[in-house]
Image (cartoon, grey):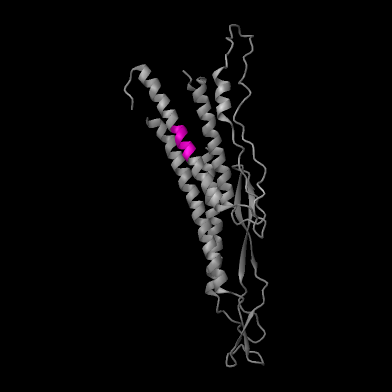
Amino acid sequence: MDLMKTLRISAAGLTAQTARMRTVAENLANADSVASAPGADPYRRKVVTFKNVLDRASGTNLVRVDRIARDQAQFQKRFDPTHPAADAEGYVLAPNVNSLIEAMDMRQAQRSYEANLNVIEVAKAMIQRTVDILRS
Amino acid sequence: MDLNSLPLFSLISQRLGWLTERQKVLAENVANIDTPGYRARDLKPVDFGKLAAAAADRLQPAATDPRHMTSAGTGATARTEFTKPIPGEATLSGNTVSIETEMMKVAETAMDHQLITNLYRKHVGMLRAVLGRSQA
């Protein structure tokens, strides 16, 4: 049944947005994972990209997580001369995580998740009404 | 009696099939709302009024001999064709899906679906009334 395919497509969308949400959580949780030694790198922000793949079993285009890449932006520097990982000038490298950007990303993931949920609800109602024909 | 031999019922099932297919395409759009480079798609609207008119004056020749050829269909069917990608505003990643438009179309498809299933139910009820059974 084709409406079942609709459900499968939307479920793939939900899975993709969940992976994105997980990455946002990782980024936020590691927002203070500074370098462990002078010259070492702190946590580097992760970015999720999506792609559209053809599922040959059902003949539908499903969305999948393409890859989880690392953000190439520069690390932040914090002045903290007493820190064990501070360099000669007293600066510690901090992750390139911006909590504002993460919050926006989280919101967007939530919005897309809700849109997929909405499509599932509507498709479910359509299936229900089709089945109801049998009861009349 | 095959209900599909009545033009109205065959039209109803074609219309339901078309609506189901459209819902699938819309689900793909919503699921790919954050996929870079994805272009939103939609089905070409089918003129079901014209189909109904064609079905109404169709006269089937009777096959009185096994060697007679029967005309298979009227040629006018509800084909599923895609529209050209709408050159709407794209995001920086080249994605043209607009969540508001998609939600509107999903609701529209669900409403049409409800209309068609109700129409089907009413007509079955009418046939039942003719048969003299109580209408459920």
Q: Position of residue A25 (x, y in %)?
A: 52, 68
Q: Residue at left 67%, top 56%?
A: B94
Q: Is residue A22 visible?
A: no
Residue toward you, B8 or A126: B8
Q: Residue at left 53%, top 65%?
A: A106
Task: Please determine whether, in this image, residue B108 is positioned above or below residue B33.
Answer: above
Residue toward you, B121 or B89: B89
Q: Position of residue B75 (x, y in %)?
A: 63, 23
Residue toward you, A97 or B101: B101
Q: Is residue A98 magenta?
A: no
Q: Quadrant of residue A92?
A: bottom right
Q: Residue at left 45%, top 34%?
A: B115
Task: Please determine whether, in this image, residue A79 is positioned above or below residue A116.
Answer: below
Task: Please determine whether, in this image, residue A5 is positioned above or below residue B67.
Answer: below
Q: Is residue B112 magenta?
A: yes
Q: Position of residue B133 (x, y in %)?
A: 33, 20
Q: Residue at left 67%, top 42%?
A: B84
Q: Quadrant of residue A95?
A: bottom right
Task: Please determine whether, in this image, residue B50 is positioned above or below residue A7.
Answer: above
- Of all residues shown, which one is farthest toward the top? B64
**Range of the magenta residues?**
B111-117
Q: Position of residue B31 (x, y in %)?
A: 57, 51
Q: Quadrant of the C terminus of chain B?
A: top left
**Chief secondary structure of the magenta span?**
helix
Q: Is residue B107 visible?
A: yes
Q: Quadrant of residue A39?
A: bottom right
